[in-house]
Amino acid sequence: MTLRTPNNPLSESVLLGALPPLLAPNTQLALGSPSQTGIELFYVQRKYDLCQGSFPAVLLSSGQQEVVRCSLTTYCGTHSVFVDYCDRWDRQSLPIDTIRLDIAADLERMKANIETYLQTHQGLTINATLYPISILAMQLSGYTKAIDVLAAAGFAIGFRRLVLTFNLLPYSV
């Protein structure tokens, strides 16, 4: 039996791929990157590549998806996206607290980017298609257990997570 294609037109790969240009503007990632956009410092479900790249960087990954039946033939739901802002402190002279403050400031800029974008566009444009979806919630983690996310790679990494919960539009089966 072949794997059936997703019914939801806004699959996780499409959604995650559309986020870096939305999140990056006005951040330290953008200002400090060679491209001046910071987009090359976003890794979409590529933790190994993140380990090989420069820091600070952002790992985007798919979180929980919840789909509920809305009618006999339609479904709707939510999709959580993890925005993990990572930085190394084993190769820096800055204290850990300063690195954490920089991470927090950039995540606040990313939240502001999202709020501004959704206020002016009322949806997310992907591949020239406007999806009138909204981000239902944003949740910013604390710093507990935010050390050594990439311990297997031997890095001293600090990170903080921003969770974006997207509304999935009704789709038919």
Image (cartoon, grey):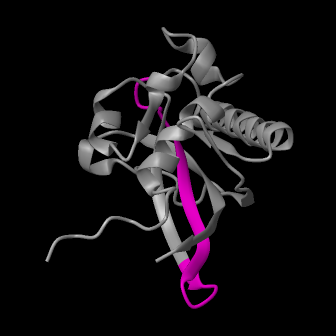
**Residue 45 on the magenta span:** no
* Residue drawn at (51%, 20%) of the image: 93
Image point 29% across, 35% down: which residue?
A: 49
Tell me residue 86's x, y (percent): 49, 39
Main SS category, magenta section: strand
| 58 or 160: nearer the viewer | 58
Q: Is residue 36 above or below residue 42?
A: above
Residue at point 58% right, 23% down?
A: 29
Q: Is residue 106 left or right of residue 79?
A: right
Image location of residue 130, percent across then percent down: 66, 44
Q: Is residue 33 left or right of residue 54?
A: right
Report which quarter residue 53 is drawn in.
top left
Q: What percent of the width, then of the height, locates residue 95?
A: 59, 30
- State the residue in front, 162 or 102: 162
Q: Which residues are magenta?
A: 67-91
Residue 87 within the magenta-colored segment of the rendering: yes
Residue 162 point in image, percent of width and height:
63, 52
Residue under the image location 51 percent in, 71 percent down:
65
